Amino acid sequence: MELFEELEQEGIDRALLEAIRAFRAEHPVPQEAQGRLIRPKLLYYGREVWQAAATALLCGENLLLSGPKATGKNVLAENLAAAFGRPVWNVSMYVNIDAASLIGADTLKEGEVVFREGPVCQCARLGGFGVLDEVNMAKNEALAVLHAALDFRRVMDVPGYRPVPLDEAARFIGTMNYGYAGTRELNEALVSRFAVVDMPVIAQEDLEKLLRRAFPQLKSKWVGQFAALFQDLRDKCQSGEISTRTLDLRGLLAALRLIGHGLAAGQALELGLVNKAFDPYERQLAADVIAARIPREAGRDQLMEG
Amino acid sequence: MDRREMEARRADNQVWNGAGDYHLHPWYRAIGPDGQAPVYLNTIVGLAQREGWRENLEPLLRSFPGSARGALYSDLLWMGLERCLTLRWQEERPALPALRRDYAAQALARLPAPQDRDEGESLRGCWWARALDQPHRESSREKAMLDQLEFPPTWSGDQVRQGVEDLLYRWYRRPRRSTLDQLGSSRVDRSFFAAWQPGRNRGDALRRLSGPGESQGQGGGLLGKKRLSPFWQTKTRERVLRDYVEGCFGASLLAPGELAQAEQDLCTGDHRNCRLHFTKGDPSTRPVKGSCARERALFQLQRQKNRAYFEEHKNQYRLAMARLSRALENTILLQREEDDTPSRWGRLRPQAAWRGMALGEERIFARRQTREPGELWVDLLLDGSASQNGQQEKLAAQAYLIAASLGRCQIPVRVSSFCSVSGCTVLRIYRDYQDQGTDEKIFDYAAAGWNRDGLALRAMGWLLDQNKEEGRRLLLILSDASPNDDQKIPSNSLFHGNRDYSGVLGVKDAAREAAALRKKGVEVVCIFTGGERELPAARQIYGREVVRLPGVSALAQTVSRLIQGRLTASDRL
């Protein structure tokens, strides 16, 4: 189904969708960046968040998607890029990333020292959406080079080169989760350059929709059970009985893919969820939650159609 | 947690999961004969609790152990209940029938051969064989009973209770409204329940303690109350005092000569008539009797309470420890800077390449090197006076949490407490910097006596001087900033009497000692546990370095934040 149709079905404001269409028409994608256009596999379910984020982007804001694990930060970023029809540059942040890794560095070309664009610079020039994944893993000093690009100046001054103005369609979307190993507090100067979306936990109903879309062959009864399983794990995390390691939406989706390829549910969920915890006791508790929802031996035939 | 406690907690988790509520107190927990918590049965217990059937069934269940056939009656009730709830919930939880079959197969495998079964075993055998659709032989009585036990899934809890009572009346003539219903019993069931062992959750796994001195504020026993010392004004007789503190707190860490030297250096000025006792809590070799033995017994009781409290909350503390360690590790990780250092090998530095060709210089490469943050030595000094009586268990647990988390991150930490008894300031070291695997000694913490903060700080300074390793010293002192000791400040004048070590004088003395520590380069931070009234005194003693503790439960988090701040600020110092 066409993305816009699905968004309409989800109740996204029609006027907003029209505005996004107009944005797309106004900002065609350069040939050079065509290969970076994406088709999202998953739809972000959460009308209010989607509308808020899209409105902010239309107004020229950059987004910071902040929230705990399994709230769909990257899914939303991808959805927005696809809806706005923008090419995507994914930049995974880490503790030792430096300014040169983001904007680029000098290199030799035919005997001359030339500037080789980094992902952020390229994204800015070609009007893409730059997804700065786990942005709070990078040092604030490294991110300082983005300050001028992210605020009203919309320019990146590359030392020894020239100022690179941002294309009108270029936006940056940061994702972050406080508490992961290697994360730090973002400084105020950087945060003030983003519109911050506090990502809510995915509702069970929305998770069911997501599962139906990603696994149309999954039987309706079991869609509910997998969504409820995720909720059971979340309850257990919230009650402080286990850590959030097993509360892994990516892991749940991976397990369903494994089931689709013939693995028994118990084993698939062990690979996707249970084994994410390294504490045997925690694994046991997670395994019990799964056992009370999904039969261990259930396979593709029992859980999926066709 | 030992295995038994882990399985009990696991069973609770299964019940909570079934009930969909983590706040309720599980009314039953099933533990199998193999010592493991069966998911199926505990899910059923949780579902019954979710349905609100506990009120209907619990009085009946409680009445069974008083009867000769109590075990059999319990078996029958649970059999009817599990099937009824499985059918009732199978739409919502389609995994239940499969779980039931798995459980039935295991239960059947544990039963003796059909010819060796007693009545209860035979009924269970037939019941589980029915669940598995296995061929089996049922007598007409068994068939009629089990048919009657197959309650419709639409029944309410009250109907299930009624159904069980009808069945027991019909087949065993058990009166429906027996007075036994009103009685509870602690007798352990056998038979089917023995297989499940879903004994009432009396919390025995939590090792609740009871007994004299259990109520709040009494944990410290006689020393727990601040009272006038019989030794006031003058020095207590040496032998009496030494025997007393050694008996109560443990043998001295220092040889007599070393201790005498330490006292000569430290017990001066306002602390002239005081004494010191450094101990790690190792039992004294001297015989302990009389009031000292009583005090020691009360300390022992407090230690048990500390451990019991921790055991009760172990799971939460385990997760908190993981979180704290992660936060600290993260801070250390982020403090590791990577520098490009000129080297003979590594990544070529283009700007220096010409020097290799023209000057023959070899260091034209750059190598990334990790710079570790400087060593930080952390001392946590707990106020061990009677003012902490109401929160000893929590304090001990939080201190343990801090020590264990710092230990995991290889940050050297020492945990001590101080109090003053009859003019002797006792410094009890629970865990020293280099100690491994001794964190549990922190549960020996017991609050008693007075607090002569000034002398305690001075003694800590002396202890800190014994550590000759390089690095920064951070002393975190948990205090209510109310120095108060029954050993008076001796007067130097024939015309003035001795003055109380409390109020302004005590605060001034503590402030002097804190300043002396700061002068030595020790960072002294007060984790303040007092109220608004004592806050100015805390500020006077520790200056800006006062952190208010919202509650003792926030101690570990507060300390973690402080240490993270210190680690982050390492470059500035």
Image: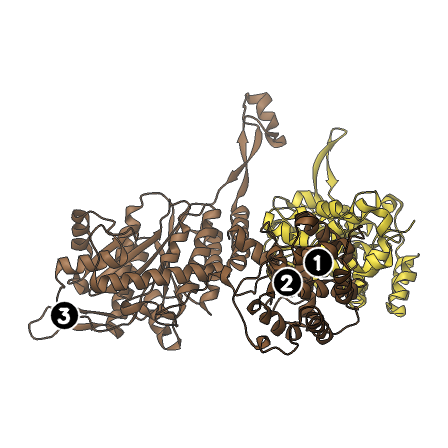
Chain colours: A yellow, B brown
Residue at the extreme left = B494
Q: Are marks 3 and 1 in contact (CB under 8 Å)?
A: no
Residue B65 horizontal/vertical position (percent): 57, 67
Q: Are marks 1 and 2 in contact (CB under 8 Å)?
A: yes
* Whether marks 3 and 1 lie on the same chain: yes
Tag in front: 3 or 1: 1
Q: Is residue A233 left or right of residue B514?
A: right
Residue A288 horizontal/vertical position (percent): 67, 54
* Of B388 and B111, the residue lying toward us: B111
* Of A207 and B539, the residue lying toward us: A207
**Res A144 visible:** no
Label 2 marks a residue whose chain is: B
Mark with earlier residue (3, 1): 1
Q: Which residue is mark 3?
A: B233
Q: Which residue is mark 2?
A: B72
* Whether marks 2 and 3 lie on the same chain: yes
Mark with earlier residue (1, 2): 2
Secondary structure, mark 2, is helix
The amino acid beneath tag 1 is: Leu
Q: Which residue is mark 1?
A: B123
The amino acid beneath tag 2 is: Leu
The amino acid beneath tag 3 is: Gln
